Amino acid sequence: MAKRMRIAVAGFQHETNTFAPVKATWDDFVAGGGWPGLSRGARIAEAVEGANLPAAGAIEALEDMGHEVVPLTWAAASPSAQVTRDAFERFWAMLSEDLRQAGGFEALYLDLHGAMVTEHLDDGEAELLARLRGLVGAKLPIVASLDLHANVGPEMVRHADALVAYRTYPHVDMAATGARAARLLAEIAASGRRPAKAFRQVPFLVPLTWQTSFTEPAKGIYEQVIAGEGGPGRKVAGLSLNMGFPLADIAHCGPSILAYGAEQRDADAAADDVLKLMLDSESAFAGRLYDPDEAVKTAMSIVARGATRPVVLADTQDNSGGGAPSDSVGLLEALVRHRAPGAALGLLCDPESAQAAHRVGAGAEIRLKLGGKRVPGHKPLEAVFKVLRLGDGRFTGTGPFYGGMRMQLGHMALLELAGVKVAVSSRKVQLADQAIFRHLGVEPTEQKILGLKSSVHYRADFQPIAEEILVVEAPGVVHADPAKLDWTKLRPGVRTSPRV
């Protein structure tokens, strides 16, 4: 029987869009929003239990292996601009205190994102790992799970014994990745042997919308990544491809490859194989973008031809999952302008409008300045809306991505203008789960057109019900084309869009 070990668990998650307008404060981590709120000690397991989250998968895997889980501190906030210095340092103070009080343990698992930028640090995770090393020493094994969008630099690689990334986008394997990382950590701790490391960086940025593992070329590449880790004799203990988060103006923004092997040559060979796949596929990481009017007219023509399922319009640039406020009305205005039949859009975050709708009640009409409040240069849509339905924002996700996630989105309202329905919330979360619409009485499968404020995660729950998917370049800060951004810190030699 394997030795029973005490293994500490902690997590700190944030995906930072340095081009976004609103920063992540301490209160954002305390509340969590679409994520569980700040948790310490035994409450971590309670907060993440049953959810598709890395910490949940790691805790379950460690307990199944018979190890004692020592929970420390866990927090996450919705993507946004930089994490404030105050939020980062307050979390560190809690984590370091909990770590010191935990007593002896044999290993440390971390649930990280990998693309955190703070007001004072371009690489939040590298700093966190360096500080942890300073406390626990060089001998204690540390393994972290990472988001597929991690922007990994050499410092992160140096301070961790292994980094294990998601392999799906939409991220339907978050809990599974936590479990993989936990098993690798336990193996390292039990054997006392550190794996050899190989780290490669890809010389071009991949736009978010074309990173999806649900379509080529990423689908085939990730299949090869999985095969590369399970080779004969398991010479490669871990192999990850991080697509990177291409909205962070830092030196190490972009895709990277991490390989861990029994010998250095094993790790190097595995990393080089994946790098070649990425380079050979560069021109395939591109696709068509529609402007709002073109998208709506195209969707209406598909409906007119007798579509039996909804046409999905992905409002990718106002995706809260990429750091947007989710209050742009560009696509909504196009739907209203063309009086798109059977159209529903969500999730538009406007707490003032949601609260106003609650004050007047369902069935009433109310003049609102909807959206357009949180990005300079954007304007609200001012009109008289009908309040169709109200919600308290408390429900549980049912789809592959948000499944088991207990949402707390505050006051919600379903409004209607010119026959177009719009779901409004008080807290932002990308519309990647049909349960969000159903909370307000909208059955997604019965709509003709669905406008979804999401870049890719919507595909997990909506691609199976979609007649067709059109990616829309409506106004927003989650730029679909990184080449249009003003880069100042990106390391030399990196192309800001794939070479076609």
Image: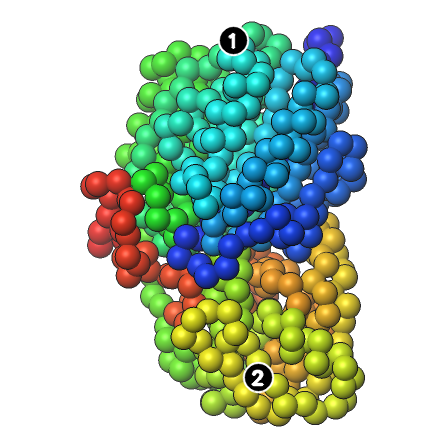
Q: Quadrant location of residue 122? A: top left
Q: Quadrant of residue 417?
A: bottom right
* Residue at (37, 75) in percent of width and height: 291
Q: Secondary structure at mark 1?
A: loop
- For the question of whether residue 188 can be seen, the reply is no
For the N terminus, the image quarter is: top right
Q: Residues within 10 Å of mark 2 (few under 14, many from 20)?
A: some
Marks 1 and 2: in contact by CB < 8 Å?
no
- Look at label 1 and name its amino acid: Arg
What's the amino acid at mark 2? Lys
Where 265 sits versus 296, above or below?
above
First reached walking from the N terminus: tag 2 or tag 1? 1
Circle 2 or circle 1, nearest the eye: 2
Residue 88 image point, x, y percent: 55, 40
The circle drawn on residue 249 is none
In the image shown, does 428 or 465 lie closer to the viewer?
428
Residue 293 position, x and y percent, is 40, 82
Q: Secondary structure at mark 2?
A: strand
- 4 on left or right of 110: right
Instruction: Tell me what residue is drawn at x 71 percent, y 9 percent.
Output: 3
- Residue matched to label 2: 369
Front residue of 382 and 257: 382
Visible in this render: residue 437?
yes
**Residue in view at x 61 percent, y 39 percent:** 90
Gap between marks 2 and 1 measured at Cα: 61 Å
Q: In terms of image quadrants, where is residue 370?
A: bottom right
Residue shown at 46% from the left, 22% from the top: 159
Q: Is residue 400 left or right of residue 305?
A: right
Residue 392's spot in the image, x, y percent? 77, 68
Which residue position is annotated with label 1? 193
Q: In the image, is residue 294 above or below residue 266?
A: below
What x and y, as percent, mark residue 419? 60, 89
